[in-house]
Amino acid sequence: MLIAQIQFAPWDKVYNFSVGELELKIGDYVIVETELGKELGKIITFLEVEDNQAAEPQEVVKEIKPIIRQADYNDVAKLPDHNKKEEALEFCQEKVAKHDLPMKLVDVHFSFDGSRINFAFIADGRVDFRELVKDLAAHFNVNIRLTQIGTRDEARLTGDCGPCGRGLCCQGFIKEFSSVTSEMAEAQQVVHRGSERISGMCGRLMCCLAFEYEGYKEMAGKLPPVGTRVNVDGSRGEVIGQHILKQTVDVRLDPDKDGGQVIIEVDINRRQK
């Protein structure tokens, strides 16, 4: 069974729908029936589920609804334009200020059937927006939803260039955010650059730190750990630093008879630099 992963808003999660006999490709817009009504969404990717898979995946597949049809020009034309979205955001922002809520509006999504409006926002913690929802529902006369998203979702939505000069990875090819940890930065020996230089425009550690993490771990595994006692050309010493990309280590030789200390750089084949 071919399954399409569909997204209704750039900051929303993806939902699975069965393709059936339709001929579709990534990037196509389709009409689907959700639990809340009809929606127009974009195909992000496809998943192939074999009929002979285990029982648990098969049970999940049975619950997946089929795509109704591919969207056409008239379907897309029914969606609210930029001006209508701006008007909705401005009105919502007025009410946010009225209730003094600690939240930042990011985007708004109108459902295809016109029965719902979903406002996306970011905030440091939980926000009690019950009174805000009442004001919005009375003004728009539709169901109102408020979705709290992360700063990385906001960066994907607004877009920009990274320090590498290329467009943000999250807006280009990253479909799902993975955890990026300080351990990854430490493994790639970039912590000394400071948090600002290894953070993206979202304020979080750059996603690209995860791309080469496994490679750095593999190369680091070929070097003796810091603190290891080693022999270098007949002299004893202690590893005090690593240069992973160069595949070398800094070794502090034991003091000689005059009490002096020498630090040398040695590659893994014991060739002095």
Image (cartoon, rainbow, N blue to C red):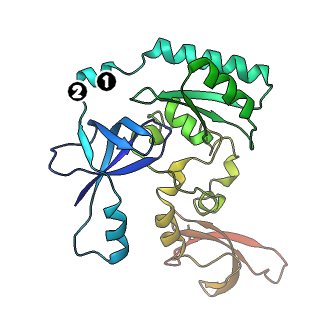
Residue 215 seen from this side: yes
> Vertical placement of 231 versus 110: above or below?
below
Helix, strand or loop status at disc 1: helix
Which quadrant would residue 95 be assigned to in this image?
A: top right
Evaluate if marks 1 and 2 touch, with contact meaning CB atoms under 8 Å apart.
yes
> Vertical placement of 101 versus 126: above or below?
above
Residue at position x 47%, y 33% in the image: 165
Specify few, some or many for label 2: CA neighbours under 10 Å numbering under 14, 14-19, or 20 or more: few
Residue 17, horizontal then vertical, whole percent? 32, 50
Q: Is residue 45 left or right of residue 104?
A: left
Residue at position x 46%, y 56% in the image: 211
Residue 160 seen from this side: no
Helix, strand or loop status at disc 2: loop
Q: CA distance from mark 1 to mark 2?
A: 7 Å
Say which quadrant the C terminus sits in.
bottom right
Say which quadrant the N terminus sits in.
bottom left
Residue 198, horizontal then vertical, whole percent? 62, 46
Q: Nearer the viewer, residue 136 or 190?
A: 136
Pointer 1 residue = 76
Pointer 2 residue = 72
Residue at position x 34%, y 42% in the image: 33
Which quadrant would residue 101 be assigned to in this image?
A: top right
Residue 250, horizontal then vertical, whole percent? 65, 69
Amino acid under disc 2: Asp
Q: Nearer the viewer, residue 185 or 239?
A: 185
> Vertical placement of 255 versus 175: above or below?
below
Amino acid under disc 1: Val
